Image (cartoon, grey):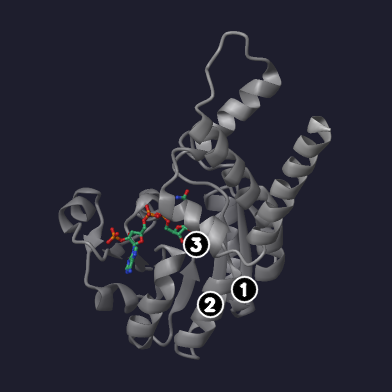
Amino acid sequence: MTVGVIGFGTFGRFMCGYLKRYGEVVVYNRTDRRDEIERFGLTAGSVEEALAQPIVILAISVQAQEAFWREHGAKVNPDALVIDVSSVKVKPVELMQKYLPKSCQILATHPLFGPQSGKDGIAGLSIVIWPVRLEETPLNKIMAFLQNELELKIIRKTPQDHDKDMAYVQALTFFIGRAIGRMGLPDTELATKTYQHLFDIEQIVGKDTDELFLTIQQENPYADEIRKELVAHLEDIEGELAS
Ligand SMILES: NC(=O)c1ccc[n+]([C@@H]2O[C@H](COP(=O)([O-])OP(=O)(O)OC[C@H]3O[C@@H](n4cnc5c(N)ncnc54)[C@H](OP(=O)(O)O)[C@@H]3O)[C@@H](O)[C@H]2O)c1
């Protein structure tokens, strides 16, 4: 089955490397990347062509999704299964429910990996899924594909529960990573195992784009509270030490 992909950024490109093994992939990217897309063994298409496919995967920044669906939502194949891969879930799901034709099926996903963590392969890594509007048969087929072909571990979670957990798992980790990244931790031969973990956070998280950082911090409705809690505890501890 042909798949339409919207977004040939960091994750879109990484995902297409897997998808192209299973059939034709029609890719649309806002900035013209037709040459790169074709060289990658994919079909470069217009937004209309990508949205006309029976399966459509949205892989663009969360910040851009409302404007994108408002402009293009009505062009989506009314029989399509639309899948998103956004790192937060509450907002993208609300937008798909609001702007897509009511006849479309919707599957929300968050692959808990990217080109960095998946550089040696994705087998054994996890993907969160939530069938927003999806019949049992296609859901089972997709779950079998994710499990048996891609060898991913599937975690089923509501968008709200996903974002609550991710406020700790991603927002807190990336927040700390940014701060220590700005400090510029020395890579010293005296490093203990614990220090090495801290250093690794900076190294891994520091390579992600600013856009992804903003998505994780600003588009997760629970992230703000968790960041404030951390800062308050740091200030308390500093105050206790000073007194
Ligand atoms: N990177 C990861 O490890 C990872 C992992 C899991 C999930 N995700 C999710 O994957 C999605 C893409 O993230 P990414 O890491 O690939 O980000 P990225 O490298 O910054 O790429 C962003 C993509 O969004 C497109 N875009 C931005 N603004 C747009 C607009 N106004 N209209 C249409 N397209 C627009 C960009 O097109 P242009 O080329 O024209 O700018 C590009 O294709 C996000 O939802 C993110 O949460 C990422």
- Tell me the residue at 54%/24% (across/down): 185
Are the two marked residues, 3 and 1, in contact with CB atoms closer than 8 angstroms? no
According to the picture, the residue beneath numbered tag 1 turns out to be: 131
User: Given the image, on which type of amino acid does mark 2 rest?
Assistant: Ile
Looking at the image, which is closer to me, 37 or 199?
Answer: 199
Q: Is mark 3 within 8 Å of ligand 1?
A: yes
- Give the side of residue 95 with respect to residue 67, left or right: right
User: Given the image, on which type of amino acid does mark 3 rest?
Assistant: Val
127 in relation to 44, above or below: above
Visible in this render: residue 71?
Answer: yes
Are the two marked residues, 2 and 1, in contact with CB atoms closer than 8 angstroms? yes
Residue 72 x, y percent position in the rendering: 33, 82
According to the picture, the residue beneath numbered tag 2 turns out to be: 106
Q: How far apart are labels 3 and 2 at the CA level?
A: 12 Å
According to the picture, the residue beneath numbered tag 3 turns out to be: 85
Circle 2: element type: strand
Crowding at mark 3 (Cα within 10 Å: few <14, some 14-19, many 20+): many
Residue 117 x, y percent position in the rendering: 52, 39
Q: Earlier in the sequence, mark 3 or mark 2?
A: 3
Crowding at mark 1 (Cα within 10 Å: few <14, some 14-19, many 20+): some
Looking at the image, which is closer to me, 202 or 184?
Answer: 184
Q: How far apart are labels 3 and 1 at the CA level?
A: 13 Å
Residue 73 x, y percent position in the rendering: 38, 84
Q: Which mark is residue 81?
A: none
Q: How far apart are labels 2 and 1 at the CA level?
A: 7 Å
Quadrant assignment, res 236: top right
Q: How many marks?
A: 3
Residue 151 x, y percent position in the rendering: 58, 47
Q: Earlier in the sequence, mark 3 or mark 1?
A: 3
Identify the residue at the far front of this view. 243
- Tell me the residue at 32%/57% (across/down): 8
